[in-house]
Image: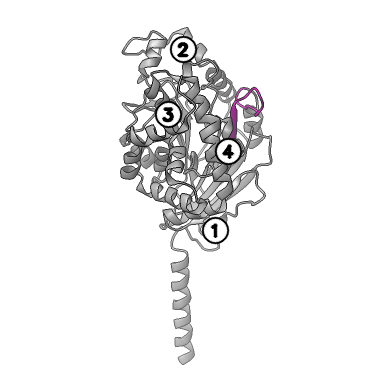
Amino acid sequence: MNNIKINQIRFILVWMVTVWAFPTNSYAGVPPIYYQIELNENSHYYTVQAEGTPFERGFTHGKKLKKEIRYAINRFKYDLTVPMMQSVGLPAEYHQYHNYVLQNTGFIEAIKTQTPDLLEELEGIAKGAEVNLEDLLVYNISFDEIFAVLEKMTGHNPAFIEGNDLNGHCSFGSIRGKKRTTSIYTCDWARPFEGSQCVMVYKKFDGTTMLITGYVGTVGIQGVNLSNGFSVNAHSKFDLNADLNGLPSLFFARRLMEAKDKHDAVVKLSETKIAVGLGYVITDKNGSVAYEVSPNQTEKYNPGSHWFAIANAARVNNDLKASVKEHFKLDEQVNMKRLPKGYWEHNADSETRYTMIKEELTDKKWMTVYEWVNLFKQYPIGKYVDENQATTNFWIIVEFSDKYIDICTAPGVPGELQAETIRVKYQ
C-alpha cells in the first residue's frame, strides 16, 4: 500500500514538473516549438536564439553580437545616412539627422505607447552590446523612414534625386493549395547593411515563438509566428505618404508578427497608424492577404485567385506623397487605374519583377523550393551585390500545412549561399 502511495506521489510530481517546464505547445513526443529549433552557428546569418522578458531577449542578442552591432550602426551613420543627406543638399553632419529624428518627430512616443515591449528589447540590446541607446533607436527607426525624414528636413524627395535608385527592392510570391500555402520573400535593402543579416528565434513568456529575419541590432524586418502559424512580409512603397508621428515600420511589422493569428494581424494592421507607406503580406495555410498601408488609409490588394505577386510600386492605395503628385502631375484625388506612363517608368524595376512573378505563377498550382529559387535568382528579382548594385539581400521560403511549417532561408540571392532549413510541428 505504501509503495502504491509513493508511486502515486512520484507520478504527480513528475506531471507537475513537466507541465511547469513545458506549459504550451507540448504534445506527446513533440517538444514545444522553441525547443524544436537549433540554429546553426556556422550559418551565413548571424544567429540569436533567446527567451525570457523582452529585455532578457534583447540582452542576449546584444551581448552575443556586440562587435557586429557596433559596426552596423557606424555603417548606417556614415555609409548610408551621410551620403543620403548630401544627396538632398544637407551637410555631411550625421548629428543633424540624429537630433531631428529624436526631437522633431513623434517616433519615440509612438514606440513607447504602442510597442513598449520592443523599446524594452532595444534597451536590452543596447545594454548587452554596450552601445548608446539613442544610436540604436535611430538605427532601428531609419529604414523606410530615412527618406521621409530627409524630405521633411529639406523639401526634396530622395526618390527623385539622380543616383538614388529606391524602387529596386523587395519581392514576394505565393500560391495557395488545398490547406497549404507556399511563399517566397526577398528583402533587398541598402548595401551598407550587407554582411549584417541576422536570424532570430525568440520565445515569449506565454510560449509564443517567432522566427525573425533582419539585421543585427534590430527588432527585425519580417518573420514567422511559429506558434500561431502565419508570416508577415513587408515591402517598401516609397511613393505612399508619410507621417512622422506614426509607428516606424520595423515596430509596426513586429506588432503584426506577435498577433494571435492572421485575422488578428489584419486587425492590428488596420487600427495602427504607420509612419511611412508600406505593403504587407500576411500568409498562413489558407493563403495570403495583402494590404498597401499609409498613414491615412489602408487598401486591400487582390492580384490573383490563388496566387500573389508583390513588388514595390503602389497599385491600389492613392494616398501618395504631395511631391509624387507634383512630380507626375497627378490630380489631388489620384485614380490608381489611370496612372501616367512616367509613373511606371519611374517604377520600371518594380514592374518588371511583378510581371516576372505573375507570369510564372498564373497557371501554376504549386511551386517547389527548387522552382522558387530558380525564379527568384533571376535578375532583377535577384540582385547580386557588386559595384553596380547598391543593395543587400536575404530571402525566405515558407510552406504552411495543417501540421508543419517548413522554412528555407539564407542571406544573398536565392541559391547563392547554403540555406538554413527548419521544420516545426505547430499543430
Say which of marks 3 and 1 sits in front. 3
Residue designated by label 4: 397
Please tell me which of labels 1 and 4 falls first in the chain.
Answer: 1
**Quarter of the image with the N terminus in it:** bottom left
Q: Secondary structure at mark 4?
A: strand
Q: Which residues are magenta?
A: 380-398
Q: Position of residue 260 (x, y in %)?
A: 39, 47
Residue indicated by mark 3: 278
Q: Amino acid at mark 1?
A: Tyr
Q: Residues within 10 Å of mark 4 (few under 14, many from 20)?
A: many
SS category of the residue bearing label 3 = strand
Cα–Cα span, label 1 and label 2 = 49 Å
Which label was assigned to residue 343?
2
Q: Nearer the viewer, residue 195 or 68?
A: 68
Q: Residues within 10 Å of mark 1 (few under 14, many from 20)?
A: few
Q: CA distance from mark 3 to mark 2?
A: 17 Å
Q: Position of residue 394 (x, y in %)?
A: 59, 36
Question: Can residue 173 be seen at all in this image of the molecule?
Answer: no
The mark lying in front, picked from 1 and 2, is: 2
Q: Amino acid at mark 2?
A: Tyr
Identify the amino acid type marked 3. Answer: Leu
Q: Is residue 20 in sight in this rendering?
A: yes
Q: Is residue 327 above or below residue 104?
A: above
Write down the residue under mark 1: 35
Contact flag, marks 3 and 1 (Cβ < 8 Å) = no
User: Which element type, helix, strand or loop, lies under badge 1?
Assistant: helix
> In which image quadrant can residue 359 be found?
top right
Label 3 and label 1: CA atoms lie apart by: 33 Å
**As displayed, is residue 283 above or below residue 129?**
above
Marks 4 and 3, the one that precedes in the sequence: 3
